Image (cartoon, helix red, strand yellow):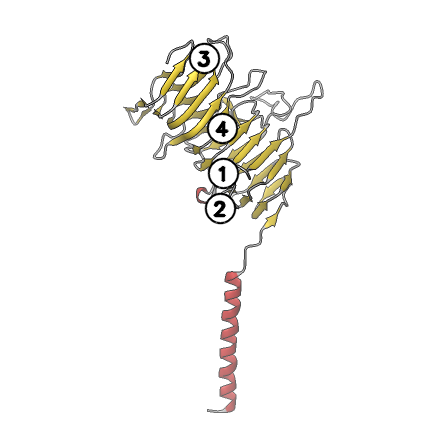
Amino acid sequence: MSLNVQKSKSIGLVSIFLMSLFLAMVTTAPVVSAVNETSSGTITGTETWTGVMNLDGDVLVAGGAKLIINAGTTINIPANKSIQIQGSICAGDSACGSSQASTGSPIRFIWGAASTAPNQTGSCYVTGVYNPDMACGSGIYLASTIDQSLTRMNHVTLDGAYGIPVDIDGQGTIKYGAMVFDGASLSVTNPTFKDTNTTNVLAFNGASPTLDGGTFAVGIDTQGYHGAAIQAYGAGAGLVVMQILNSAFTGEETDCGSQGGGRSAVYLEDSFVRMDTLSITENSYGAFLRSSSGYLTNSTVTTKCNAIDTNSHLVTNGQTQTFVISDNTITPTDGAG
């Protein structure tokens, strides 16, 4: 074999080795991730929020993008601004890539106070809504397009969110939610809601979230926009049911009847929901089910007025579903059980 042939073979082998090494370096290179970068606008890649994150506008996590929020992070958000998730959000859960949040190290979303300038209206004063409140529109919106395998939220606190208005049926039926599940199904563990004007959680369009270990409160709005702590419309009616587990609800003990202004802790319509180990206290009403079914088990419901109201059951594929009430302690002061 000639020297030139040997050299050619050696160079070829070296080239193959270098190419293999280069490919190995490429395939093992870490994914570039931004940190505390997007204070407003659209996140299109992977971004991590940690420490203190100050927003100055709405944030959208686009489809295919991922927002990671580490334990102990505080997100300060202007009044009437929102975070909308079309891709994925991993907040306080090590299973999806963030550091693990806890009671002592929660994730806090804090909305600022709205302007009190007279004769001004906010972003919700539009056709079909006409809500003038300057804080209206604040909250977290989870779309049906989320990547459920990468989306989890644990030990998150929403403080001071007014709620996002949503047309839930495309026909002008406007409902509000500080955390909105629009066809989204994911696990949210240990959520806490403070000073929500309208409704803590709004689930619709087939959404089937699991809410576990939550602290919820009826809305506090004084202009008539306050709602139940949790509202569901057409939720949990598919193969996966919506679940509310190990959670506490409080509110306000207003007078009973239509003039009292009280709201139920949980309001369900055209939905199937499993409720287990709930505590509903210090509120006028407990749960109201309209054309809905599911379970209420192992719970304590102590209310001033009616504890449990039902108005027909959910019908799917021509079959009427049942509502099972079992192993509860139900104590209404003035109303019916």
Mark earlier in primary sequence (2, 4): 2
Look at the image and tell me whether residue 169 can be seen: no
What whole-number distance in Å separates the C-alpha atoms at marks 2 and 1? 9 Å
Numbered marks: total? 4
Above or below — where is 19 with respect to 10?
above
Residue visible at 59% across and 27% down?
160
Residue indicated by mark 4: 215
Above or below — where is 29 with respect to 67?
below
Above or below — where is 32 with respect to 52?
below
What whole-number distance in Å separates the C-alpha atoms at marks 2 and 4? 22 Å
Mark earlier in primary sequence (3, 2): 2
Q: Are marks 2 and 4 in contact (CB under 8 Å)?
A: no
Mark earlier in primary sequence (2, 1): 2
Residue indicated by mark 1: 154
Quadrant where the image shows the C terminus: top left
Question: Depth check: 173 or 43 in front?
Answer: 43
Residue indicated by mark 2: 94
